[in-house]
Image (cartoon, rainbow, N blue to C red):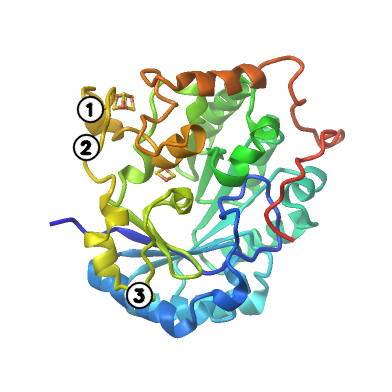
Amino acid sequence: MVDGPLGVLAELTHACPLSCSYCSNPLELTKRSEELSTDEWRRVLDEAADLGVLQSHFSGGEPLLRRDLPDLVRHASGLGMYTNLVTSAIGLSRPRAEALRDAGLDHVQVSIQADEPVLSDRLAGISSFDKKIEAARLVKELGWPLTLNVVLHRQNIDRIAAILDWVEELEADRVELANTQYYGWALRNREALLPSREQLRHAEKVTREARERLRGRTDVIYVIPDYYAEYPKPCMGGWGSRQLVVGPEGNAWPCLSAHELPLPRANVREHDLAWIWRDSPLFSEFRGTDWMPDPCRSCDRREVDLGGCRCQAFQLTGDMYRTDPVCVLSPDRGLIDEAVTAANDPAAVPAGGTASEPVLVPMPAVRPHR
Ligand code: SF4
Ligand code: FES
């Protein structure tokens, strides 16, 4: 018998006012007219609660673009779930925030692109820095715990000290400094996003110092980029083992990038969540270790990292059953080393800007929204 998931990530919409070049949305976005209705989402939340889900994360795209967001928060809250809003904060006006508070929203996570408007607005694709700061202040004023999420990459990682100054100024309860994961849009834009080794050394030093300074006030989480690691992470804590993602059109996934894999779909319009989680071929495919080829099959770390990330293996090799190329034991590690060498080449894309000297390199042409 498979244990139920701890959390559900409800991707309410792919629509978003921002156009970040590392977006985790699929390359083919769901149209607004194809999104699940309010009643369908309510049913999904009911089925998630029956499965034992304790946390619902409302995400997107930008979930604030769904007018029924307070209704869905109220419903999840009524089911006894801890509710979290994952937002760019664009659209988090005071009336909207108060409606969400009245609906029982427990937590807000706001994304921050950089520490100053020129770079931040450039990375977000629209003028948004001041609105984000204002919304983060509102979150604290209304008494919510605030998490700031910063996706780190070549263009902003040198600004990490100034970003952490904002974390302190905004009195965030937690900050997630998450190096970009190279799937989907981020993989296509990798050349402009992958930091150099020197940039990472600097960021790690600054983060260590900030962790000391902010101890007892802010949890500082730093997610290392796996391209610079020796072994992969156990992606999502294991395929189909802790989290469940439901996309805007009702497709359920074990992770944010599985939509790219050549596996059968499982849609909440056709099946209930319990069948999808426990019995669907999609969620069963990579559970446990039986599916593994060598070198994972005979490796003593196979229960530790579970062979790494299936999406990364597929996106880099075209074969979702291969060992994650990040692993030093993988026959495909050369694919990672090549990208790392290019990122450390002095002739590589210059690293991103400073407050007085904004990024000179245009972000790549491939952009998810607009
Ligand atoms: Fe993990 Fe497989 Fe590498 Fe072993 S060979 S460390 S199980 S990814
Ligand atoms: Fe899909 Fe890692 S992101 S398994």
Residue 173 coordinates in the image, percent (x, y): 50, 51
Q: Residues within 10 Å of mark 1 (few under 14, many from 20)?
A: some
| CB-based contact (under 8 Å), mark 2 and mark 1 | yes
Q: Is residue 43 above or below residue 159?
A: below
Q: Quadrant of ligand 2?
A: top left
Dot 1: what SS? loop
* Of labels 3 and 2, the one closer to you: 3
Q: Is residue 285 left or right of residue 93?
A: left
* Residue pointed to by mark 1: 297
- Kind of element beneath mark 2: loop
Look at 57% across and 38% down and name the residue there: 180
Ligand 1 within 8 Å of the CB at mark 1: no
Name the N-terminal-most of marks 3 and 2.
3
Q: Which mark is residue 270?
A: 3
Residue at 61 percent across and 16 percent down: it is 341
Q: Is residue 224 visible?
A: no
Report whether residue 73 is seen: yes
Return the disc, 3 or 1, that comes first in the chain's sequence.
3
The residue sitting at 23% across, 27% down in the picture is: 297
Which x, y percent locates residue 328? 40, 18
Report x, y in % for residue 336. Answer: 52, 23
